[in-house]
Image (cartoon, rainbow, N blue to C red):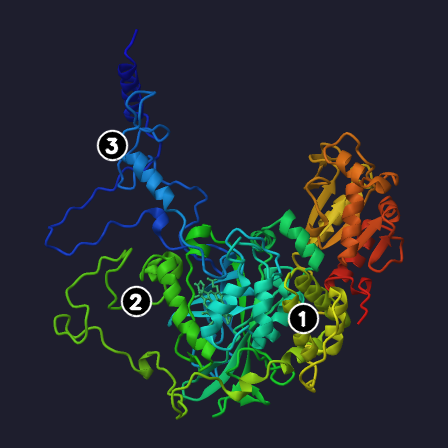
Amino acid sequence: EKNPVAAAAEKVVEKVQEAVRPGNEIPGAPGPEPAVIEEPTKAREPLPPKNDQHGPDTYSPTGQPTGAPRSRMAQDGAYLTTAQGARLYDTDHSLKAGPRGPVLLQDHHLREKITHFDHERIPERVVHARGAAAHGVFRGYGAAAGITKAAFLAEGVETPVFVRFSTVLGSRGSADTVRDTRGFATKFYTEEGVFDLVGNNIPVFFIQDAIKFPDVIHAGKPHPDREIPQAQSAHDTFWDFVTLHTEATHHTLWNMSDRGIPRSYRMMEGFGVHTFRLVNSKGETTLVKFHWKPKLGVHSLVWEEAQITAGVDPDFHRRDLADAIESGAFPQWELGVQTFPDTEDQMFAGIDLLDPTKIVPEELAPVRPIGLMTLNANPSNFFAETEQVAFHLGHLVPGIDVTDDPLLQGRLFSYLDTQISRLGGPNFGQLPINRTHAPVNDMLRDGMHQTAVHRGVAPYRPNSLDGGCPFLAGADTGAYIEVPAQIPATGKIRDAAASFDDHFTQPRLFWLSMSPTEREHIVAAYTFELGKCWDQAVKERALKVLANIDTELCRQVATGLGLPVPEASLPSAVVEPSPALSQLGEDWPVDGRIVGIVTDGTADLDGVRQVRRAVLDAGMVPLVIAPAGGTLGPDSDPVTVQRTFTTARSVEFDALLLAGAPAPAADSYGARDAKAAHGAGATTGVDPRLLLMVTEAYRHGKAIGAWRDGAGVLEAAGLPAGSPGVVIGQSSSAALDEVTALLAGHRVWDRFTPAL
Ligand code: HDE
């Protein structure tokens, strides 16, 4: 009998021999680069980076790669190596004293592999941890040329961008469709350096001074004892804070409106929130607020839909963005500015431009478009790009400057500070996604994760050893020069301007600008959130806050909570509503909308084929839904089933088309449970899962079309022809035409019967 140690050793020897046997190389694999060893006294360049250490691929506006081709393969070398480049013969077994013996400390490969893995995660962002991002291009219209010298805003200039959308409160793994503000952060890689516009989808903020940020976030995050609830504002600490600190009232109202539950990142507005100062080549200044206007319009989910989606598809927004870009439906936004004269008091129409809890209604200061952004490429590695990207309001280019908004000023400190801990040191600017596209010649040296091998001996100024280099730029050579704005002559003070004390005029303006349906959604949101609070005093205080916004809003929420209606403590402000704030009442492009086509394979398959094609031609996405997977129809001309009754849920679709009335398949998985749970539905002869899909889509205001047998489903679901937004066409194309027209309005608003 063989000694087991000797047998194991023999196996190792065999493996090594196998690996190194001549002719066992992977054909065409590149050999190692011959290393050039230079005199140690000479300054030496490091070896070129590994292929996957190059910067992220860049894309032209049409999505064509402009740099190296993007590899779909994780590996590009012939042999697996250690991080030090030593080739490996086995990565499946640790080095042991015999096949059943203890693992040896000597196994460097094991330790390197596990140690690296142990440190793969970095701290998530303290806020905005959950996000999704995309690459794109920004094209200046030149319309801002008179007010800013920023080169990337000049006519026709194209600038690569990287945009990260996010929720604020939830952890990295939380659901996308929660009720929350969304981040909308854009990095412009301009020729004059990086410009970051770090905005949100809501134009106001909870607080007026950065010193309150830890307070509002501690209140919004899960309770520290049990760490629940995740990614929610529907809990006591949030409502405790925002009702005591009433400058949060305006932002809270926006969160309770449909803006808190966007349909898609592609259908959100973005706002710079603060007022910025632009400066032109003559040194003249203009105050501006930045706006991103989505080409697809601003659209939201309905609350029940958002809640179901959080369970059915927690990655809903992330998937939606990536799928749209992958399919060539590139989302677009126009960048616009509201402009205001740079007066001494920095007020406009009685609104304090330095107060980030205030908007300037578009009716008073129209948003002028100054450029177009198109997102045309998905990141190739989530960690390297979406996770490691680091934005900062202080990343400015000549022509754009900040103002004294105290929230903005505090942010200028916070972002750099947080990134040092999140990205492990001060050199995160060298990470590929953060690298500027402008030449860098700084004197920053060393630090954690330094990847540059700086040469020379004089990283200081003045010097004579480098011939006095580098030189300083001036206004005529593109230096970034701060606008010499006046600082009011007062003493040091911990206080705010008196104009910051008005916390209710603008919430009332927002409320009165909403359509009746939007108001009802707001009432429902407050009733839900406060209904989830436990502390009676918090609920009562919240009602007092609402009373100061609007009596009717307060009355309706109080009724829902079963609490008495308090009196307002302040006189109601007289305000002029701003129709631009409402999301309803217009028609928008339907690009990228998802249309579910329900069929069982027996009903008018030709109609299904035609309508699928027509949906595609209209720039939308058709998904065929049938009782089971596979294909329908003859093998010569099959229709592929993309969703089954078990995998589909109504929330995935913007509209439904019904081609057939599939009967319950009693023996299929899911049908039995559904039948048991929907006893009534089961008697109609239509699969109960389909009935659920149709009634849910109806409840969520979605267009539903049917033709031929499909009409039977509507009848079984109790939705006769003539119900709002329910159409029965003579043919599949007739049904689609009507559904498309309804989709342009986003939802069938007539189904919501507001009491307000
Ligand atoms: Fe942020 N915010 N913030 N914020 N913020 C961060 O920076 C902070 C504020 C916004 O996709 C953090 O790198 C303070 C307003 C976005 O990577 C942190 C204050 C607006 C993102 C931070 C604010 C924003 C952040 C966390 C009050 C809209 C995500 C991780 C003074 C105009 C960016 C990080 C991304 C991220 C601090 C208020 C937008 C901690 C102190 C107002 C979109 O630095």
Residue under the point 89% across and 54% down? 721
The answer to whether marks 2 and 1 mark residues whose Cβ atoms lie closer than 8 Å is no
Q: What separation in Å lies between label 1 and label 3 (alpha carbons)?
A: 66 Å
Q: Is residue 307 above or below residue 278?
A: above
Q: What separation in Å lies between label 2 and label 1 (alpha carbons)?
A: 57 Å
Q: Which residue is mark 3?
A: 106
Q: Is mark 1 within 8 Å of ligand 1?
A: no
Q: Is residue 197 above or below residue 691?
A: below
Mark sitting on residue 440: 2
**Which circle's residue, 2 or 1, is located before the other in the chain?**
2
The amino acid type, in three-letter code, at marker 2 is Val
The amino acid type, in three-letter code, at marker 1 is Glu
**Which circle's residue, 2 or 3, is located before the other in the chain?**
3
Q: What separation in Å lies between label 2 and label 3 (alpha carbons)?
A: 43 Å
Crowd rating for badge 3 (residues with CA inside 10 Å; few <14, some 14–19, many 20+): few
Q: Is residue 341 left or right of residue 489?
A: right
* SS type, badge 1: helix
The amino acid type, in three-letter code, at marker 3 is Gln
Tell me how many marks there are: 3
Image location (x, y in percent) of residue 103: 30, 28
Q: Which residue is mark 1?
A: 540
Residue under the point 42% across and 59% down? 389
Give the foreground label among 2 and 1. Answer: 1
Give the foreground label among 2 and 3. Answer: 3
**Which circle's residue, 1 or 3, is located before the other in the chain?**
3
* SS type, badge 2: loop
